[in-house]
Image (tube, coloured by chain):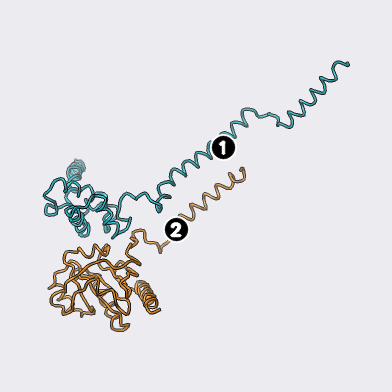
Chain colours: A cyan, B orange
Amino acid sequence: MITRLILIFMLAFAPMSAAFAVEPDEMLDDPVLEARARDVSRQLRCVVCQNQDIDSSNAGIARDMRLLVRERLVAGDTNDEVLEFMVARYGNFVLLRPPFNSQTYLLWFAPLALALAAGGIGISVIWQVRRKNAHPDDLTAAEDAAIQALLDADAEDEPQS
Amino acid sequence: MKRLLFASPVLISLIFGGFFLWGLDPERDPSAIPSVLISRPAPEFSLPEVAGTGVPGFSRGDLESNPEPVVVNVFASWCVPCRAEHAVLTRMVEEDGVRLFGINYQDEPEDAARWLAELGNPYERIGSDLEGRVALEWGLTGVPETFIVGGDGTVLYKYVGPVVGETAIREFTTALEQARREGTS
């Protein structure tokens, strides 16, 4: 019973705890800009509590970064320009979603390449085994040719007998 | 082809082993954030003095034409490790003639002045970053953080966390010596 109560409490407050990080005094008056600020904040990594976005982080620096995001948006930056502004100061690390460029090709393509390689090896092994099992006593081309030569020789001999 | 297939388990385990070896290396800090500022010019900023400390504030211009590297330390009176680091920095200034600038991060001027009056002030200049806005320009991830800025204003090195303890001090002084050598050559 008590565990159930605790669970109910935790679940009831779980969605709120994430929304609590952005405090009312930080928010912009313009709802459109504020929505964009929230969107940009969700793409930026908190540098203190890594693996959390700044939108849901209570860290002091996360708050400063949120204010900076809003400052840039009010100054007329696009969402991408704000992200670039942060990357210029904190590097690609600050983006929760790694960018797609020459430095990260390995990161993006490695899973696909590994899957293809594994699939290729697997298929070739299965294929080889299958072929062997289907015709276990197949003769080689050379052996076939030898037999054919014998048969031909036999056929030439026949009229005389 | 077949031989390659037989060798593949060995090859795969070697690759994985190498990866694990890298991952388990105690020297590797997985939460370390590479700084983009290294070997780039110091960010544009201008900080007022901290009232009551008696030393001027500074801006990027003050970092651009120095005969030797300058150490820029981000500190705050509310930061506990800064207290321990303060002694190390003071010793560097007094014994090695290091030029030390301070960025007072999100700190009330009275608190900072009281803190420095109590512990002594090794800083040649102190800028007050009350809002913490300039610290973001420096790519700050926490307090304290210490930068070595070359005589021409290029950021040469960054140390995250307090420069306290033998390993940290050795690492930092090595970087500083290297910066000084490069500056004079």
Question: Do circles 1 and 2 both sit on a common chain?
Answer: no
| Chain identity of mark 2 | B
Q: Residue at x 16, y 45 (%)?
A: A32
Is disc 1 surrounded by few (<14), some (14 to 19) or many (20+) residues within 10 Å? few
Is disc 2 surrounded by few (<14), some (14 to 19) or many (20+) residues within 10 Å? few
Residue under pointer 1: A125
- Percent across and percent down for residue B159 are 32, 68
In front: B7, or B147?
Answer: B147
The relative height of residue B174 versus residue B28 in the rendered view (above or below) is below
**Of the residues shown, which amino acid type is indicated by label 2?**
Trp
Image quadrant holding the N terminus of chain A, namely top left
Q: Secondary structure at mark 1?
A: helix
Of the numbered discs in the image, which one, if any, rests on residue B22?
2
**Of the residues shown, which amino acid type is indicated by label 1?**
Val
- Percent across and percent down for residue B22 are 44, 58
- Percent across and percent down for residue A23 are 14, 53
Quadrant of residue B115 in the image? bottom left
The answer to whether A33 appears left or right of B31 in the picture is left
- Percent across and percent down for residue A122 are 53, 38
Of the numbered discs in the image, which one, if any, rests on residue B11?
none
| Chain identity of mark 1 | A
Q: Residue at x 85, y 20 (%)?
A: A157
In front: A56, or A8?
Answer: A56
